[in-house]
Image (cartoon, grey):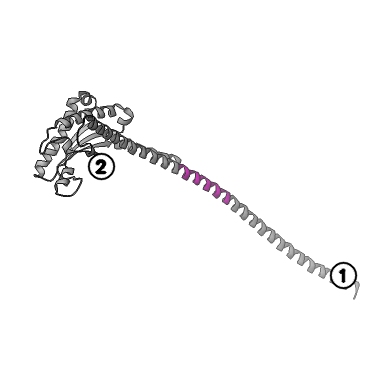
């Protein structure tokens, strides 16, 4: 082989080698590009993961605050219920003390019903078919007037009270019309005598009191025997709380949620 042929052969070999090198360089650049893309994807994922973790932490804080606010609202609503019950208990205890002090029979007939009302059995106040308060009943109603004045003098309690409702209830004997009139007259007699015996109560707090008659339509027990009828003849005292107080508590909670959002 001549020198010239050998030289051409080496150039051809070099050309093939250069082509292989170029191909490998292209493959390497492609791999580097893919590696860069993968690196960018990983970094982006890490950023997204970090953001997600931060959002989770923020959500947990919001949930924790909402739970606290809801707990606070429940506590306040329970406080309202406790205030109502404390007023009822205070009135009931004072009535029972007065019955014992005045040696009035029937102290065990003063109780707080399932509806939260104070219940006075009719025999403590009225004769049969009468709306005139008896002597023992007058002593009791006089004491009631003092109790209610003391309660309403307490501004912290008074702010929760919308009305003190005196309710008259009869048994099912006689007609509904007659019983409606009798129950209403008895409720009015209690309110009127409280104001008569304690003029300060009417002057300062007359707007809080309301009298109503329910005839036989809200019996404590179902039955037409003498014992059932005796239980159904009664005066109930209902402490009506202001809806606005409860609504204020709820509104405050809802506003706190809006502020957090």
Visible residue check, residue 247: no
Where in the figure is residue 76, as x and y percent of width and height?
A: 38, 38
Where in the figure is residue 73, as x and y percent of width and height?
A: 39, 40
Q: Which residues are magenta?
A: 49-66
Q: Nearer the viewer, mark 2 or mark 1?
A: 2
Is 16 covered by the magenta stretch?
no
* Majority secondary structure in the magenta region: helix
Tell whether 175 sits left or right of 242.
left
For the point 91% across and 72% down, which residue is it? 3
Where in the figure is residue 153, as x and y percent of width and height?
A: 29, 26
For the point 78% across and 65% down, which residue is it? 18
For the point 12% across and 36% down, which residue is it? 127
Tell whether 35 sits left or right of 149.
right
C-alpha gap between disc 2 and disc 1: 121 Å
Which residue is disc 2 drawn over? 113
Where in the figure is residue 20, as x and y percent of width and height?
A: 76, 67
Q: Which label number is shown at residue 7? A: 1
Tell whether 255 sits left or right of 115.
right
């Amino acid at each position: 082989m001549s020198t010239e042929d050998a030289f051409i052969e080496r150039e051809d070999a070099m050309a093939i080698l250069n082509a292989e090198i170029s191909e490998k360089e292209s493959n390497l650049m492609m791999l580097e590009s893919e590696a860069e893309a993968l690196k960018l994807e990983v970094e982006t994922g890490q950023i997204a993961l970090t953001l997600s973790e931060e959002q989770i932490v923020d959500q947990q804080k919001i949930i924790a605050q909402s739970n606290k606010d809801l707990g606070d609202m429940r506590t306040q609503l329970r406080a309202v219920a406790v205030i109502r019950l404390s007023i009822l208990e205070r009135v009931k205890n004072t009535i029972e003390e007065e019955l014992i002090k005045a040696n009035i029979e029937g102290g065990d007939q003063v109780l707080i019903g399932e509806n939260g009302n104070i219940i006075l059995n009719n025999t403590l106040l009225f004769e049969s078919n009468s709306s005139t308060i008896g002597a023992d009943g007058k002593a009791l109603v006089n004491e009631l007037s003092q109790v209610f004045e003391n309660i309403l003098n307490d501004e912290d309690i008074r702010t929760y009270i919308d009305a003190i409702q005196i309710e008259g209830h009869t048994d099912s004997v006689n007609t509904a019309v007659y019983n409606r009139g009798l129950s209403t007259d008895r409720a009015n007699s209690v309110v009127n005598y409280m104001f008569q015996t304690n003029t300060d109560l009417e002057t300062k707090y007359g707007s809080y009191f309301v009298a109503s008659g329910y005839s036989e339509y809200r019996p404590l027990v179902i039955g037409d025997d003498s014992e059932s009828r005796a239980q159904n003849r009664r005066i109930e005292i209902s402490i009506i709380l202001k809806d606005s107080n409860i609504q204020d508590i709820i509104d405050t909670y809802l506003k706190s949620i809006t502020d957090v959002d």
